[in-house]
Image: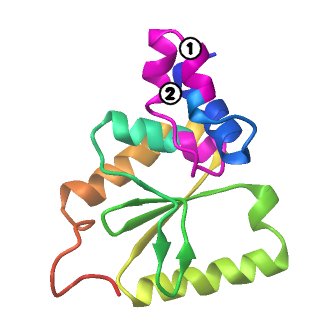
Amino acid sequence: MSDEHWIAACDSALESGLVDRADLDAVLNARGRSLLSKCDEHSQSGMESICRVRLRALRFGVVVQPKIAGVGKVDLRVGKLLIECDSKTHHTSLENYQNDRRRYRSALVTGWMTMRVTYDDVLYGWDGVLDDVQTITRADRHRIRGRNRPA
């Protein structure tokens, strides 16, 4: 299992409450504890975990599951760039489809940028996703500034 897949599996176990960090820490070797330090029990999908791990490895400041006024919780935030890791299971019902559109209209109106990525994007098209994130961040369009802060 790759490091990022191990982290994703541990994120899932921590988020579900099947184990806690102290129990894992007690049975892991030094390498395992190092990987455990990269885990986040707030992560709600393996795809989200992998995306977070990859971005943080490149020194992006990633916030997991932040609550955004008027939008609700989102998967990841880098500055004012919201990254949603969409799966078919949770984003294709009519109710979820309509709710997603309402949420992202609200995000746009209040100054947030949203990037929606799929499973295939993260696992098989990561270079393209990363290019897009870097294009936004290189231009500092993701920075939260005083007067221009999203609501």
Magenta residues span 23-49
Q: x, y (%) of residue 103?
A: 58, 82
Q: How many marks?
A: 2
Residue 5 visible, this orientation: no
Judge whether 45 appears above or below 78 on screen: above
Residue 111 visible, this orientation: yes
Q: Nearer the viewer, residue 99 or 70?
A: 70
Q: x, y (%) of residue 37?
A: 44, 30
Give yes or no for contact between labels 1 and 2 (Cβ–Cβ under 8 Å): yes
Q: x, y (%) of residue 149?
A: 25, 82
The residue at 84%/72% (across/down) is 93
Residue furthest toward the left?
146
Find residue 28 and name its label: 1
The residue at 36%/53% (across/down) is 133
Name the kind of residue labelled 1 in the image: Leu
Horizontally, is 87 left or right of 11 in the view?
Answer: right
Horizontally, is 110 left or right of 95 in the view?
Answer: left
* Tag 1 secondary structure: loop
* Tag 2 secondary structure: helix
Horizontally, is 148 left or right of 50 in the view?
Answer: left
Quarter of the image with the N terminus is top right
As measured in the structure, the alpha-carbon distance from the residue carrying label 1 to the one carrying label 2 is 9 Å
Judge whether 39 appears above or below 63 on screen: above
Label 1, residues with CA under 10 Å away: few <14, some 14-19, many ≥20: few
- The residue that disc 2 covers is 36
The residue at 20%/54% (across/down) is 138
